Amino acid sequence: MPSDLVIVANRLPVDRVQLSDGTPGWRRSPGGLVTAIEPVMRAGAGTWIGWAGGTDQGLEPFEDDGMHLVPMSMSAEDIERFYEGFSNGTIWPIYHDLVAKPEFHRVWWDAYVSVNRRFAQKAAEVAAEGATVWVHDYQLQLVPQMLRDLRPDLRIGFYLHIPFPPAELFAQLPWRRQILEGLLGADLIGFQLPGGAANFVRLVRQRVGHKTHRDLVYLPDGRAVRAAAFPISIDAKGFEELAQSEPVAERAQEIREALGNPRKIFLGIDRLDYTKGIYARLRAYSELISDGHFDVEDAVFVQVAVPSREQVEQYRILRDEIDRLVGRINGDLGRIGRPAISYLHSSYPREEMAALYRAADIMVVTPYRDGMNLVAKEYVACRFENDGALVLSEFAGAADELRQAWLVNPYDINGMKSALLDAYRADSSELTRRMKAMRKTVRQHDVAAWAEEFMIQLSDVGFHHKQTRPAHHG
Ligand code: GDG
């Protein structure tokens, strides 16, 4: 049955798993996006199109908890060229301020075009007349225009979860023009921050030559495209309730005891990604111990590094670097049963995450560049007693809202050291003052409000009556 609402994302909200009887099945991967979109999806007979992970071919669409899910298959070559290659080896580093060096390969681009086309074709097949299609993220930037060519009747929204870079960096992309035009197929293009939206509009003016006014782009065909900021958030109530639950409270206590009941627990939780600033943060922390500000008996740093993109060379190098650094720090500074850093290269269920957030006194989030960073917001949501400190990079999107965090520049090791120390020494009235304000923000702007705002604005965009000039070739 055709759908009135179609979500197109690189991944489905479920993972392909082996069930206990050995047969393949599906397991829900609980993420904020699913939680946010679920009610809308159920109300409007929604369909979600995405890759299931792996290389299984010919997977059939199925129903899951009131949602219609359409798995897209990928060959090993698609994964290598489209996913690990163009998406994560070209776009990801450029969009994160060149924290790593991007690679440009024409065969990667060709794969990006053809996978985007397949997603667009699938969306065109399942969308009802006049339906709304919401396309997500940097892997699918060509889908909006491809879809519009196939189905001009649709209302198309696009949301970018990662930063949109300044024009000077974006300009390096050999396919910059195609990407801008791909995005302009949407009626509404959402970014995390106003800066990303402004970068986009400026680029469209410079490189494609369309007329723009504030957050609007006027296309020669009469369409007006809006580019605006919609800072994403979390299911704040869900996290708070989880953190308050008895099993999570007990587990948090268990974690503290297992760590030897130190006075303070520092915590980092990140995908093992070079944008997250894990190396610099651990160095800063270790120097606080070697400088004698505190001892391994007083404090411990728990770093959870969730395995990510392990087939990509730069990610393997990063893993080795962190392994070596943690080994050296613990070798130099640790004592028996008292490591300076408790390092976990693994992923955990949501309950364990909540227990870690509850156990931690100081949450340390220090990316070099991050679209938003949901971990920072999740920590805040879990601190229902208005305690705990957040040390947060000013280069995370979340820093725009969480102004009461200890804001740091992750490139400045000494600056990070003093922020960590201030957070360590802060008295409870200061912690409460800061946390209260941040909790208010996170509670008010949750992920449901985010999705609703995007959908309202998407239903509102349309046409203009401006004189335009034809696009130029730049
Ligand atoms: C991209 C952008 C933007 C992590 N480990 C486990 C686990 N997680 C969950 C966290 C959080 C999410 O994954 C990670 O989100 P982040 O925002 O921190 O970072 P990215 O993965 O880089 O996400 C980012 C985001 O998209 C949304 O737009 O904020 O800037 O880069 O929710 O809790 N969850 C579970 N086990 C884990 O081990 N269950």
Image: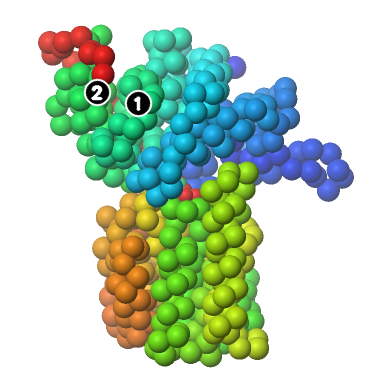
The kind of secondary structure element at disc 1 is helix
Which residue carries the number 1 mark? Answer: 176
**Residue in view at x 16 percent, y 20 percent:** 211
Contact flag, marks 1 and 2 (Cβ < 8 Å): yes
Image location (x, y in percent) of residue 474: 26, 19
Quadrant in the picture for residue 213: top left
Out of 454 and 421, give the one closest to the viewer: 421
Residue closer to the observer: 397 or 465? 397
Residue 334 visible from this viewpoint: yes
Q: Which residue is drawn at 28% across and 80% down?
A: 430
Give SS at disc 2: helix
In the displayed structure, 74 sits above or below 369; it is above
Q: Is 364 on the left-hand or right-hand side of 67?
A: left
Q: Which amino acid does label 1 sit on?
A: Arg
Pointer 2 residue: 207
**Residue visible at 51% across and 62% down in the picture:** 269
Q: Is residue 144 above or below residue 268?
A: above
Image position, residue 19 (x, y; %): 80, 44
- Circle 1 Cα neighbour tier, 10 Å, few/some/many (<14 / 14–19 / ≥20): some
Residue 60 position by quadrant: top right
N-term-proximal mark, 1 vs 2: 1
- Please say if 265 is above or below 313: below
- Residue closest to the far right: 21
